[in-house]
Amino acid sequence: MTGTENYPILLSPLKVGNTTLKNRVIMGSIHTGLEDRARDTTRLAAYFAERARGGVALIVTGGYAPNRTGWLLPFGAKLTNRVEARRHRTMTDAVHAEGGKIALQILHAGRYSYQPFSVSASSIKAPINPFRPRRLTARGVRWQIRNFVRCARLARSAGYDGVEIMGGEGYFINQFLSDRTNKRRDEWGGSAENRRRIAVEIARRIRAEVGTDFLVMFRLSMADLVEGGQSWDDIVALAQDLESVGVDVINTDIGWHESRVPTIVTSVPRAAFADITGKLDKHVDIPVAASNRINMPDIAEGILARGDAQLISMARPMLADPFWVRKAEANAADSINTCIACNQACLDHAFVHKTVSCLVNPRAGREVELQLLPARRTKKVAVVGGGPAGLSAALEAARRGHAVSLFESRPALGGQFGIAQRIPGKEEFSETIRYFTTALRDADVAVHLGWRVTAAELVAGDFDEVIVATGVIPRIPSIPGIDHPSVLSYADVVEHGRPVGDRVAVIGAGGIGIDISEFLTTNASPTLDLKEWKQEWGVTEPEAAPGALTTPVPAPSPREVYLLQRKKGRIGAGLAKTTGWVHRAALKAKGVHELSGVNYERIDDEGLHITFGERHERPRTLAVDTVVVCAGQEPVRDLVDDLRAAGTTAHVIGGADVAAELDAKRAIEQGTRLAASI
């Protein structure tokens, strides 16, 4: 079957306003950081052009502020004058040259602006920002509206095909819409009608300014997921008002940045909020776009077929694979480099003001810098190790024209990803293994599984380049009784399925220790169950409660778990910004006992004996059945020493190079960069 037969709606054209989109796929907005610096315009143009070449119908840029009070951060992206507009021509021309369309997102951060001159509907500080915004006067509100209109006019002059007005995620317009942040009693607050007045007025005046042949989209918060959020009736009324003033498309937005419900992490089930989009779609005649955790063509087609939306908006999946649409057209979904929603190189970068990229595609945002050009001379390359580092090195080397042989001692590819995919909420990691398996086959890499290759075999193979990506093994700490039968490594538990008792102590509270604790406290199922997930986090139907929130009802843990770390301080403090709080909340909901500043004295038949602090005070015995060790890793480098002894130089990458906390982002990028250099 062809892609058009498998995905007949997804790949069909759609008339939106006076514009025809060639398919139903929108690349949603994601702020890359390249928008913030004029010197990065060429890089941003190359980034957009590659995605237009990949077949996406419409690209929406990262957010550009309509004035300085709306900056995301000081000196961040804005579009306020003709000089800036002329610079944008580089990007719009690049997209149009590849047959794509592009819209500029107008984003005013409001109280989320990370600078002391921020403004909002009311002077209420956001819990995620140290700065308290200034309350706008009525005159100030009207000035802000004029700035939105000016930004849209400049976008049209810069060659954009449309604009998207950011009205969600708890940003400026959303702050007016919600009683949580709008305590005004003038024409811009008080009643629901007055609270939505600014959104409607911005859309109405932009439409009047840009004419009818220019797309006007609105990113609408359909579930705020915060206390004091909008009611469903208010959301529907706003959507209908926006349609009446000339908005062409309503794009789905779910959750504020301060929400305590995860919406973007890998543990969120696919298309978790598409049903909410479907509810709104029934109330308006203009197209509505579904968004959030949609990453494969079959999921997208299913949403469209059910009538829950007429368009699909995806941001991170277009980072992971810019040719997502082309592969869907070729009915080659298995070759899509699927977004696994890890956030490690995209949103985690964005929230600490680093340039966005992608863990599974380190070329994202680096299209100019990291080019994988055909090799000048074909080489014979051996890659030892089928984890993330070895897989990326082998694949990209083969794509450059080298003859590559990959040796993996285990019976399957994946390395540490093979373990990670078994952790509840990380099932998506299996998609990366599937992608590499397919891509290696298509690139004619000779894959040898179950083969612990020796240095002598590599030397005899007469390889021009040897890449060692042999990974890590669990580090076993020196604790009296560490060889007790109750002690298991994390690999024993997850990979080998060794039985675990009802009371468990987990030694080590890094990323692996937290993953193991979640594994032990969850009755894992093959797929993420949406109903159970919503109960776990307290998400209800939008008609049932403002903000679509209810009381969380987490499933009980099948075990009692103690999570321990040597260092003092909060467990999980070093986890990434977008995912760390989710893990901490999940552990709390499961009743995990968290102990810091622990000394491990001994392990025996009574359990794990511990003390606290430098003086080894407050001795305590944890009467546990099982002790799971997650105390770091050791690099597997024996082969490196053997090769050197044989006079062969090897490139060492991934965990074999640095065996700190497991870092797939570094490993895949390291493998890709090495492949680009040989």
Image: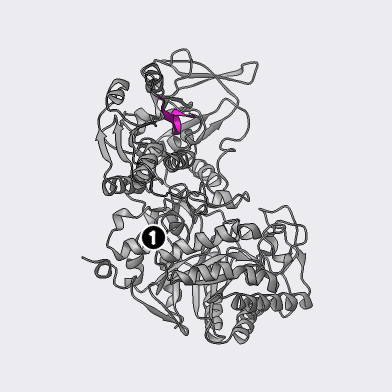
Q: Residue extending furthest top?
A: 480
Does the magenta run of residues contain 154? no
Of 247 and 396, nearer the camera is 396
What kind of residue is marked 1? Phe
Of 658 and 278, nearer the camera is 658
Q: Secondary structure at mark 1?
A: loop
Of 303 and 311, nearer the camera is 311
Quarter of the rendering occupied by the N terminus: bottom left
Say if residue 106 shows up in the picture. no
Q: Residue at x 56, y 53 (%)?
A: 260
Range shown magenta? 649-658
Percent x, y of residue 414: 34, 39
Tell me which colouring the rendered structure shows. one colour
Which residue position is annotated with label 1? Answer: 323
Percent x, y of residue 668: 44, 41
Q: Residue extending furthest front?
A: 376
Does the magenta run of residues contain 650? yes
Q: Residue at x 34, y 37 (%)?
A: 379
Residue 84 position by quadrant: bottom right
Residue 515 position by quadrant: top left
Say if residue 429 shows up in the picture. yes
Q: Residue extending furthest left?
A: 1
Quarter of the rendering occupied by the C terminus: top left
Q: Is residue 475 above or below residue 286?
A: above
Percent x, y of residue 630: 46, 28
Q: Is residue 325 left or right of residue 620?
A: left
Estimate how packed mark 1 is, as few (under 14), some (14 to 19) or many (20 or more) residues with alpha carbons within 10 Å: many
Q: Is residue 456 left or right of residue 94?
A: left
Of 23 and 445, nearer the camera is 445
Q: Residue at x 52, y 41 (%)?
A: 588
Q: Is residue 609 above or below residue 108?
A: above
